[in-house]
Image: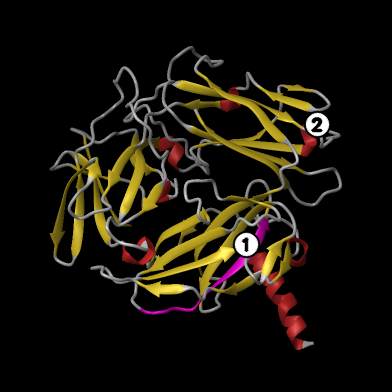
Amino acid sequence: MKKISFLILFCLVSKNIFAQKTFQTKIFDSNIKTLQVLVDNKPLELPVIELNSNDRIKISFDEMSYSSKSFNYKIFHCNADFAQSVLFENEYIDGFYSGIINDFALSENTLTLYANYQFFLPNDDFSFKVSGNYAVIIYEDNNIEKPVATARFSVVEPVIQIVNMKVLANTDIEFNGRFQQVEFEIDNSYFPISNVFQELNVSVFQNRRTDNAAINIKPTFTALYKQTYNHNRALIFEGGNQYRLADFSSEYAFSGEVDKIRKEDEYYNVFLFPAENRAEMSSPNSGGDADGRFLINRRGYDDADITADYMWLHFILPAKMPFADGDIYLLGDLTSNIFDRNSKLDYDSQMQLYHKALFLKQGGYSFLYAFVPKNAQNTQKPQPILQKIEGSYWQTENEYSVFVYYRAFADRFDRLIGVKCAKF
């Protein structure tokens, strides 16, 4: 009886702690590094798995001490906006909704000592019962009130199809200029929807970013089995430029924008070439890029999770004067696409440049420099401008993903009924 009462109390307390919170993939403890949320064996795909499939989400992170710690996780079901849903654990999980992270290994052949932790969802202890968005709270010593990190992913039940997806340079605001406009259709031939405008919730993301995402978009035209999304100004995105690359997978051979690597004291320091302002280019840089992703790798070594070393990566952006009307931030998965102290560059008046140093694990990182106006920084969703530093071009290749959620009139949660990701 006491055990049951404790379980109920734990559920109520945890719901109260995270009520009204919109989850992000984010680190809260400075000793935690390199948080990754991937589909197992598919590191470049969206963190989305199909309901009742064999796919698994792999979550990994490093703790910057050379010893084992006691970490736990707890799984939450979320609404379309990644706020916690009203479902109880037994409604979305078949089995245990929390567990201990037992899989860890100490680093090998590295200057910086750390322990790598990883776990998989679902696992032998549970399976997912419903589709939708999910968040995982990672915490130490069984203290869920002080999470060290949160991670988010999605589970889809593909009952509709997203078809005829394309990106146009001829947008509703200009022709062949700075912007791109997304269009697509939803084919729900095998999934009748009574009220499309109330029951469907569609979001569109550019390069997995949430700051400029188009949320809860409604169709332009609707039919019984086809919903059309075109000529919608909410689906116009800044084209930007191809992502910059820093590849320091090897201490001795590097590429991308890396100028040099020097060993200073007990750390390696990776210095990038001073970044050029790309705002006045006639077209974007050529060549493919990883659209803001990073990939952990140490050339010549197996199992990069524990053999890749940590290095200080120095970002350098020359500027004769600091911008009076805004600040410069790093944009990409290396900062979780979050505009905060960790991603903000500082201005050095003596050197006449913006600078940022991040302690990153060896591999390849793609990123952009984003300008955030001062009047937007205190808003809940600051809107960065790429044109200021990177330029913005309709020819730029970008990755767009469409998430389709469904909630019938009597439902209590958002089902994820379709996902499509494509590069244009």
Residue at (28%, 55%) from the top-left corner? 299
| Secondary-structure class at tag 1 | helix
> Which portion, as a residue range, is magenta?
67-77
Left or right, 237 with respect to 315, comes to right
* x then y, percent, for residue 8: 75, 76
Report which residue position mark 1 lands on: 18
In the displayed structure, does residue 161 sit left or right of residue 119?
right
Quadrant of the drawing holding the N terminus? bottom right
Expressed as whole percent of the image width and height from the top left, the position of residue 202 reads: 67, 36
Left or right, 229 with reference to 393: right
Q: Which mark is residue 136?
A: none
Label 2: which secondary element:
loop
Rate crowding at label 1 as few (under 14), some (14 to 19) or many (20 or more) other CA atoms within 10 Å: some
- Nearer-N-terminus badge (1/2): 1
Residue lying furthest bottom: 2
Give the residue pinned by disc 2: 189
- Considering only vertical position in the picture, is 169 above or below 98? above
Assess whether residue 7 is covered by the magenta stretch.
no
Mark 1–mark 2 Cα distance, whole angstroms, equals 38 Å
Tell me which residue sits at (16%, 38%) in the image: 352
Question: What is the magenta segment's predominant secondary structure?
Answer: strand
Residue 236: percent from left, percent from top: 54, 24
Query: Quick check: can you spot residue 341?
Result: no
Residue 117 relative to residue 99: left or right: left
Camera-nearest residue between 315 and 44: 44
Task: Give above or below for 290 relative to 139.
Answer: above
* Render colour scheme: secondary structure
> Where 357 sits versus 94, above or below?
above
| Nearest the eye: 293 or 387 | 293
- Mark 2 burial class by Cα count in 10 Å: few <14, some 14-19, many 20+: few
